[in-house]
Amino acid sequence: MNIEILEKTPFTLKLYVKDLPIHVLNAIRRAVMSEVPVMAIDYVIFIENSSVFYDEYIAHRLGLIPLTSENASDKYKSPEECAEAGEKKVFSTDCFVKLDLEAEGPENGMLTIYSRDLASSDSDVKPVFDNIPLAKLVKGQKIKLEAFARLGRGKEHIKWSPVSAATHKYVPNIIINSENCNGCGKCIDACPRGVLKLVDGKAVINESNLLLCSFCRLCEQVCEPRAIRVSHREDEYVLYLDFTGALSPRKTLIEASNILIKKLDEFEEKLKNLGVIQ
């Protein structure tokens, strides 16, 4: 298996993966989305809310705020452990981080409450972004609440997913028969991604834009001499991950891989117990 980094930022990762079956890559992608635990607000206790928003509306907004979770799995119990112990009822510090919010509208004008106004009991668990607006208050309006965040998994609710997007696509394999190509340029005009270009009167692949190909096959349709054929390469894919910032790309992929390995080990053990394999 070969992996090449095509793009890497604190919030995005694009990998070129070769010699890996699609079902394995898809298992990793699904584990990233659904199995890697991160922190998110799950319970909100409203002490006072005289804003124009219902309690449920504010609670929903709070739940979707991504929280830094890089060290959370080492400090707090897993979702399964908390559920078994019934910790939800008592908001145990082994499972929950408390975030307080108190704000009141000014005498004049309007006050906007942002995610940075949440005061966390753990400096390792706080909003990833400071400027997420939550509500606006005017004179006479007040919000006072206690929010409790815990570890969860994306399969329970998307707010516990460390990624906002996780996709993979095939790598295009474009074959141009130069003998049949008459250099009319229709395929170049039809391609919406600039994958093709004209060189010395012949259509050729613009290598810098090859991975942008969306397999629309418009080039094939307009090519009267049928000089172009678009397919995909076997066991070559581009994996794209868009992160919320709750976890780093490195930790997310490591956690997803470890979870997948653990599931396979458990599956193998069950098969052995059933006598299916030795």
Image: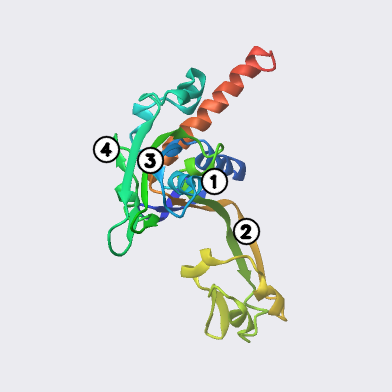
Three-letter code for the amino acid on which mark 3 is drawn: Leu
Q: Residue at x 35, y 59 (%)?
A: 138
**Residue 19, numbered label:** 1
Above or below, 129 against 154 in this view is below
Q: Check disc 1: other Cα within 10 Å, few if <14, some if 14-19, many if 20+.
A: few
Secondary structure beneath disc 4?
loop
Above or below, 4 against 87 in this view is below
Going from N to C along the chain, the mark reached first, 4 or 2, is 4
Above or below, 75 against 112 in this view is above
The answer, for residue 55, to whether it is visible in the render is yes
Going from N to C along the chain, the mark reached first, 4 or 3, is 4
- Mark 2 lies on residue: 232
Three-letter code for the amino acid on which mark 2 is drawn: His
Above or below, 58 against 276 in this view is below
- Mark 4 lies on residue: 123
Q: Residue at x 60, y 65 (%)?
A: 214
- Mark 3 lies on residue: 145
Mark 4 or mark 3, whichever is nearer to me: 3
Going from N to C along the chain, the mark reached first, 2 or 3, is 3
Mark 4 or mark 1, whichever is nearer to me: 4
Give the image location of residue 130, x and y in percent. Answer: 31, 52
Cα separation, mark 1 vs mark 2, equals 14 Å
